[in-house]
Image (tube, rainbow, N blue to C red):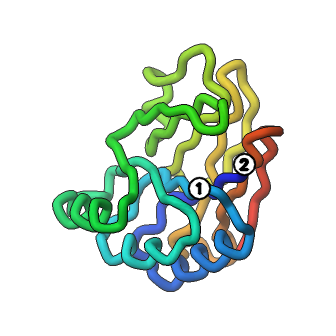
Amino acid sequence: MRIGVVSDTHNNLKNVRRIVELFNSAGVDRVIHTGDITQAKTLEVFAHLDAPLSGVFGNNDEERDALDAAIARHGFEFADPPYEFTLHERRILIVHDPHDLDHALKPGLDLVLHGHTHRFRLERTRHGLIFNPGECAGHMLGLNAIGIIDLEQLRPELINF
């Protein structure tokens, strides 16, 4: 099973359209957003994914009523961080802000995902693989990236666009 990881899209609809194309071309089984969607119209673009979308809310996701309505309309699954679940026999933890990891990390996790910093992070710790694909919002030209993680091997791949 392969999951797509995206963060901090900040309502850049042009980039989100490209992200959807990349994930659909890659044939990922699920996409996880680590927060800062910002506006519901971003979720309307994500509705064109060929895979289910889940994730957490970030500090810039202030239009919660509109976001919640779009999430319900499209059958997405979002939660306030920290959000922990099992997928393909892997324990996954998602937060938006990596500072939240201080209180959320615990034994038995395989994969930890976060956003917020707009910086790539790949770190193997005793708490599993910690990953942030980095910039997706177009704020840092030439540095836009998403991630794809093979859950069986816990092997990440970064795709720049």
Residue depicted at 28% across the width and 60% down the height: 72
Location of the C terminus by quadrant is bottom right
- The residue indicated by pointer 2 is 1
Compared with residue 110, is residue 27 higher up or lower down, i.e. above or below? below
Image location (x, y in percent) of residue 23: 65, 69
Quarter-of-image position of residue 106: top right
Residue depicted at 82% across the width and 39% down the height: 153
Of 117 and 45, the residue lying toward us: 45
User: Is there a contact, CB below 8 Å, between mark 2 and mark 1?
Assistant: yes
User: What is the CA distance from the residue labelled 2 to the residue labelled 1?
Assistant: 8 Å
Residue type pointed to by label 2: Met
Answer with left or right where residue 149 lies relative to residue 42: right
Quarter-of-image position of residue 50: bottom right
Q: Is disc 1 placed on a helix, strand or loop? A: strand
Residue depicted at 47% across the width and 31% down the height: 84
Residue depicted at 51% across the width and 71% down the height: 137
- The residue indicated by pointer 1 is 30
